Image (cartoon, helix red, strand yellow):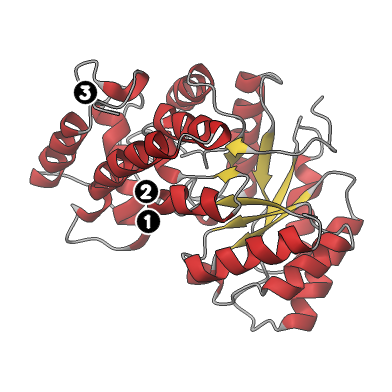
Amino acid sequence: MTSPSAALTGVVPPLLTPLTADGEIDLPSLERLVGRLLENEVDGIFALGSSGEVAFWDDARREAVLEAVTGTVAGQVPVLAGVIDMQTDRVLQHMRAAERFDLAGYVATAPFYAIAGPEEIDTHFRTLAAATDRPLWAYDIPVCVHVKLSTAHMLRLGTDGVITGVKDSSGDDVGFRRLALANRTAGSPLTLLTGHEVVVDGAYLAGADGSVPGLGNVDPAGYVRMHRAAQSGDWEQLRAEQDRLAQLFEIVFQPTDKVGPAAGVGAFKTALRELGIISTNTMARPMSPIEGETVDRIRAILGQTGLLDGGTATGEVAGA
């Protein structure tokens, strides 16, 4: 059993959820994807996050994902579970359903759909924390929940022992740096992980403890190398890795007829299908998969960044 008090740092990819052509969870592909992440020495796995299309899954599918992921991981690295839902009682239900799994903690957003202010958000996180002995992570993703978690509030929750860390997907680099500085000044009550794939190097310089990159499903080795470079103070290697990963991230801009997860997660799934890791690039309904010339452009970027034909996916960055 993973120690609930252990700090989770490093590279913690938000796991995609592969689907069959008819939209069911593709367990063999899911197990291959998890196995690939483990082979590339990630530090943890975040299941049922936004990259995992959690907002589209019913309770049975959520449990099936956790069953497969924790079974495949078998304690090799910590697993975080997203318990994301609109309001507190539904999140509590997800937490109770996940109690039987070997998890290192839960990840929750602020409540959404019904408008929530600071008082409601505070009550939400404190209620969740009181219901479990496992660590609770705050997921800051205003693009989805339409509220930005404030630095002062997150630090107060951290100091009070309500949350153990923040998974920052705000895209607000100024806000992240302010949070990192305030956290360090307060004695670092929070562990800070960035989900901003193309500026992880800057997040490390600001004081991030690691990353939760959706693109890490496609190239986990690159993010692991970047974390190790940050730990050793090799900022030139860090920059070179980030530049290549930023080039790889261009895959999400190739679907010009799609937006949101249909473009971003859809591009990640398409890349993994082209790499032979998952069987289809099927998306949860009502989203449609990426097809046609867009696939060719994504495949070309995979080749340019060394992920096809035995390139730099498991080696060093060329010229670094």
- Front residue of 30/133: it is 133
Q: Residue at x 78, y 51 (%)?
A: 164
Residue under circle 1? Answer: 261
Residue 184 relative to residue 212: left or right = right
Q: Residue at x 79, y 28 (%)?
A: 2
Q: Residue at x 68, y 81 (%)?
A: 116
Circle 1 residues within 10 Å: few <14, some 14–19, many ≥20: some
Image quadrant in which the C terminus is located: top left
- Front residue of 221/100: it is 221
- Between circles 2 and 3, the one closer to the viewer is 3
Q: Secondary structure at mark 2?
A: helix
Residue 110 relative to residue 259: left or right = right
Does residue 172 show up?
no
Distance from label 1 to label 2 (Cα)?
5 Å
Q: How many marks?
A: 3
Q: Secondary structure at mark 3?
A: loop
> What number is the disc on residue 265?
2
Does residue 52 show up?
yes
Residue 269 relative to residue 53: left or right = left
> What number is the disc on residue 308?
3
Up the image or down, 177 lies above or below 79; here it is below
Up the image or down, 243 lies above or below 232; here it is below
Distance from label 1 to label 3 (Cα)?
24 Å
- Front residue of 181/124: it is 181
Q: Which residue type carries mark 1?
A: Pro
Asked if the residues shown at circle 1 and circle 2 are in contact, with their CB atoms under 8 angstroms apart, the answer is yes
Tell me residue 307's x, y (percent): 26, 26
Q: Quadrant of residue 236?
A: top left
Tell me residue 113's x, y (percent): 59, 77
- Between circles 1 and 3, the one closer to the viewer is 3
Q: Which residue type carries mark 3?
A: Leu
